[in-house]
Structures are given as structure tokens and as C-alpha cells.
Image (cartoon, grey):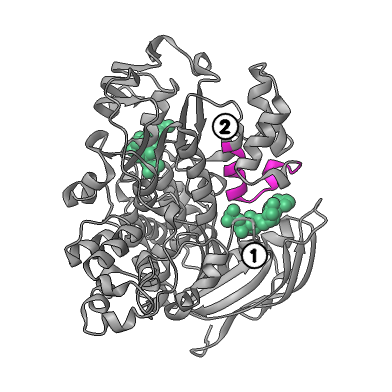
Amino acid sequence: MTKNKSSTVVEIKNLWYTYPGRLEPTLKGVNLKIKEGEFILLTGPTGCGKSTLLKTLNGIIPHESGGVFSGSIKISGIETGNSNQMELSRRVGLVFQNPDDQIFSTTVEDEVAFGPENLCLEREEIDKKIGEALRMVGMSGHRLNSTNALSGGQKQRVCIASMLAMMPEILAMDEPVSQMDPLGTREILNTVRELNRKMKITIMLVEHRLHELAPFADRVVIMESGKIIFDQPASKAFDHLEIFHRLGLRVPEPVELCHTLGIKASPFSAEETFPLLTTGGFKEKTRRYLTRPDPERKMELPEYSLEDTEPLISIRDLWSGYEKNRMVLKSINLEIRRGERVAVMGTNGSGKSTLLLNLAAMLKPYKGSVKVFGEDTKSKTPYSFAGRIGFVFQNPDLMLFCDSAEEEAKFGPLQLKFENIEERARISLEAMSILNLKQDLPQSLSRGQRLRTAVASVISIDPELILLDEPTTGQDRVNIEQMMDYFKNKGSTLVFCTHDIEIAMLYSTRILVMNEGRIIADGKGRDVIKNIDVLRKASLTQPPVVEIANYLGIDAFSITELVETLIRRNPEMRGAEGIKC
Ligand SMILES: Nc1ncnc2c1ncn2[C@@H]1O[C@H](COP(=O)(O)OP(=O)(O)OP(=O)(O)O)[C@@H](O)[C@H]1O
Ligand SMILES: Nc1ncnc2c1ncn2[C@@H]1O[C@H](COP(=O)(O)OP(=O)(O)OP(=O)(O)O)[C@@H](O)[C@H]1O
């Protein structure tokens, strides 16, 4: 097909869509044009309709979904309503939000082969494509592995590889890197960006982690309540910070910092920020202070050293895994006390989820011991700890089976024969901001809403120990903060896996870093974060604000701390014309 440089590959006109069984439309008059080779970052608060819009591109909506659909979508000039799904899938590769919804083959190789096989390519060509695609996502060593034996981030890599093996005209990706470690995310997005540039593959990527993804995009498009309300070049998007703040969306730390300091610039990285802070114009540019850093976001000093209390969790020389001849966890020693909030970080596949499964007695030690509440898990089942441990899985769909969000929240208290069941459900749904969705079928909620339903179903039993496997994925900033503030204010004992160093720094009292099944660092966030070697092994980098603080010779770990230190150094920045902190 020959197209000129600026040909339109996606044209959406006045698109309305209502899911079967819903009274309100989810898409309300969407208009959007995308040119060949553009890289669009689509974002917006959870539940605003991003996934729904993506599903209209490859025809899942309306061909498979049913519901009421009006308006028009053309893909390379072809009306999706008049085309069949096979044809559309060839043109538009969709990476699903939940890898478990996409993966259906038993081995990695078969999963990636599926697309090229359907294109009827020669076997040799198919093999080549599998090899190339797996290499691009860093999964060459897993070609023959079972897809069931992959970690969450590894599954996402395989999903991306499946699409790369097909090289569609358009890649529609629904939070494709949400469970991936930061360095892996960067590497894969560099690859996607290269394909986008060289092969002119058009990219439409949905994400909440704007701070990590924006540098790759050409355009940032924001949806709110089923409509597109913002569409700007990525380089200029954060000049309109008020929109991101109003919608509770996350922005790159350097942008937030410059905005706080009144510097009119929107740098994405620490490196881009350095010259802005050191050139002669810095003070002049800071004459107009725009926003005061939110005091709630101020970093808390860890209070985890509760040496005198009995450990709630005590692990001695733990070796554990899924197969006898392949240990995932290797000689783990760990104590966690009541009231600690422990972030577990590490590269994809380093053993974080496996550690959590051991804490919940869902996996048992091969060697060594795990004691929770003083009881050895070896002789326990997960049910022994019912009511005392609350576990939210990496894939929340695995724990949602009731007919409504409210029933999910009532299920635990009912089973445990608690009193005040209605009240417990109401409080937990309200705490997760989903009370208005209490009658909804969980499967008809957005991913962010489903995750919060799963959390509500756990906090309604008020467990002594809460285990959360990647609770920040697919959530906007406001919801992440609300969830983590809830646990912080309640004084919960929390162990949570995350790849999000900014959230770990803000909300944990202690960070554990894992590498190849071992704990390689364990301490206060501000100590762990200084150890570049440890961060590298965990596929992490320092948050930009820490890099900027280092550059300025300041000991600060958050925007608030950095700004306050700058003011202490330059008191004249405060006052009528300076920074008003
Ligand atoms: N299968 C479905 N049936 C009925 N309603 C649905 C269905 N899927 C989604 N919805 C509703 O459509 C709205 C938009 O959902 P969608 O998944 O598109 O949001 P989103 O912006 O992608 O959210 P998130 O950021 O949480 O992934 C939500 O209010 C959701 O409840
Ligand atoms: N059910 C399983 N059967 C066999 N091996 C598994 C299974 N689940 C995970 N593994 C393997 O165990 C290792 C650790 O997986 P785990 O899920 O604990 O990693 P993780 O650190 O949580 O990764 P991610 O950040 O991707 O979620 C990986 O190499 C994975 O392939």
C-alpha cells in the first residue's frame, strides 16, 4: 500500500458507544484523527473509556461486544463496521490490558507464533519472527517455557512480542508495560519507538504512568467521561498542568518541580532540568511561584524500627519455588513488625510475588521456615489465616467472582460471620471510591475499578496483615494516593510489590530489593535509593527529583524537601516576588 507522508490511518467521527446492559454511554461523541507513524499517548482518569476506545480500533467493539454503537471509525480508509474482524486484526494489533486475557497458548513460542501463522508465512519466516520478537522484549531465554510459569511482567513482554511478530500497521496498546520494571519498560519502549520511526507503525498507547511514557510520544490525548478533552504535542502537553492536576493524573517530577519553582519549562528528565536550575536566569524565572507542593506528599521519615515488638513475620533461610529442581527464592531471611509498610522491589521475575505467596501460606518452603503471627506456615493452609491476612493478587480478576462490587466487599465478612456486614462493605467501598459502583458487575468495571473492588473486598475484613501485589498498576495518581493514604492513616501492616520507586519512597517505611530470588537491599527508602548498584540490579533508577537534588548538592528526596531546602539556601526566593512556601 502506498501512502503519502501525512496520510490519516485512523479517523474517528462522532463515536458513541453504550455497553449492553448499561443505560449511560461509555463513549460520548469521540472525534480523533491519527496520521500514519504517529505515537499517541492516551490517558485519563480510571473508568473514563480509554480501553473501550482502543477496542473500537480493531473491531472487538462492536463486532464481539454487542451494545449500541454509532458514528464512524475508519482504519486506513476502511469503515470498521463494514469490515470483518480478521481483516481488522491484521491491520490493528491490540495488546490487552490484562495479559491473561490475551495469552491462550501453553508455550511462549506458540503464543508468539500465532499471529505470523495466521498470516500464512513460511515456517522458516515464522521462526525468524518469533526469535526477533522475543529478542526485542528481552525474552529470548524463555522461548520454550510454559506461559503459566511466567511472572506478570514476563507475560506482558510476551504479549508485546506477539504483536511485534505480526508488524501490524497500527499497534494499539492498553497499558502494555504496567507490570514491567522501569528499565525493561524503557528498553521495550525504545524498541517500539524505533519501529514506529523506521517502519512507520502507528502507535496508540494507553497509560497512567505519563511521567515515564510521555518522552516517547508525539501527542498526548486525554479523555474524561467518554470524551476527548485535550490533544496536544507531547512537548507542550505539560504546559497545561492545571488539566493534569484537575484530573488527578501523574506528571513527570521535573515538570512538577519546575512548575513549583515558577520556571516556565516542561522538562521530562533530570538531565533536561539541570541547565534550567543553574543558568543565571534561574532566580528571575522563579519570581512567580505557581503552586505550593502538597504537604500530604511530603516524605515521611520511616518509623519502622520497632525493635522491641515481636515480629509479625519471621523468615529463616527460606528456599521456595514451583518446581523442586528450580528454586525461585534463595536463602531469604526477613523480619517484619506490626505497623511497617514494606515495599518489595526488583526486576521482573526476581521473586516478589513468590515471596508474597509464601507469606500467605499459598506456597510452602522447600527449605527453611516462614512464621506469620508466630505460626509456622508449613503446617498451615491459606484458610488458617482467613480474616488475618488480606491478599490482593497481581491480577485482581482472579479474586472477583460475585455479582456486584458490594457483594465482593461483603463476601469475606459474611464467610467469617462478622457483624455490621453492610457497614463494613460500605466503608471499604467508600474508602476505595467505588461506592457509586456498588451494584455493578465486577467484570463490567474498568481495570482500575476492578483493582479497587478487590482491595475493598480485602479491607472489609480488616486483616492484621495486608499483602498487595502491584497495587498501583493501572491507577491514576489520585486513586494511588487515596489507597496508600488509607493504609498509612490506618497504621496497617502492609507488604506490597511495586516497580514504582516514587510511590515506594512516599509510602513505604522500608524497601526490600530482590534480585534473582535473593534480598540484596533492605532499609529505609532514602538509604536504598542512594545505592546505584542495587538500583541497577533491580532495574530501577533514582527518581528524577533525587538526581536533581544530588546535582544541586542537596540532601532531598521529594519535591517538597527540595524546594524547602532551596528556599532555606536562598531566603530571598521567599516573599512577595519569590517562592511562597
Ligand atoms: N464489559 C463492560 N460492560 C459494561 N460496562 C463496561 C464494560 N467494560 C467497561 N465498562 C464501563 O465503561 C467505563 C469505561 O471503562 P474502560 O475500561 O474503558 O475505562 P478505562 O479508562 O480504560 O479505565 P482504567 O484506566 O481503569 O483501565 C467504566 O465505567 C466501565 O464500568
Ligand atoms: N506458576 C509458576 N510455575 C513455575 N514458575 C513460575 C510460576 N510463577 C512464577 N514462576 C517463575 O518464578 C520466577 C519468579 O516469579 P515471580 O512472579 O515471583 O516474579 P516477580 O518478581 O513477582 O515478577 P514481576 O515483577 O514480573 O511480577 C520467574 O522466573 C517465573 O518465571
Q: Nearer the viewer, mark 1 or mark 2?
A: 2
Q: Does residue 260 show up magenta in the picture?
A: no
Residues in magenta? 439-455
- Per the model, the C-alpha gap separating discs 1 and 2 is 32 Å
What residue do we see at 53% from left, 16% from top?
383
In the drawing, what numbered circle is on residue 6?
none
Residue 91: % across, % down: 57, 69
At mark 1, the secondary structure is helix
What residue do we see at 63% from left, 17% from top?
416
Residue closest to the far top: 379
What residue do we see at 70% from left, 25% from top?
421
Residue 497: % across, % down: 39, 40
Q: Which residue is mark 1?
A: 53
Foreground: 142 or 382?
A: 382
Q: Is residue 33 left or right of residue 296?
A: right
In this rendering, does residue 502 appear at all?
yes
Residue 417: % across, % down: 67, 16
Ligand number 1: quarter of image: bottom right
Q: Does residue 448 show up magenta in the picture?
A: yes
Foreground: 566 or 107?
A: 566
| Residue type indicated by callout 1 | Leu
| Residue type indicated by callout 2 | Ile
Seen in the picture, residue 41 relative to 152 is either above or below; the reply is below
Magenta stretch: helix, strand or loop mostly: helix
Q: Check mark 1 vs ligand 1: CB closer than 8 Å? yes or no.
A: yes
At mark 2, the secondary structure is helix
Q: Is residue 71 left or right of residue 144?
A: right
* Category of crowding for the residue at label 1, using alpha-carbon neighbours closer than 10 angstroms: few (below 14), some (14–19), many (at least 20): many
In the drawing, what numbered circle is on residue 459?
2
Picture quadrant of residue 48: bottom right
Q: How many marks?
A: 2
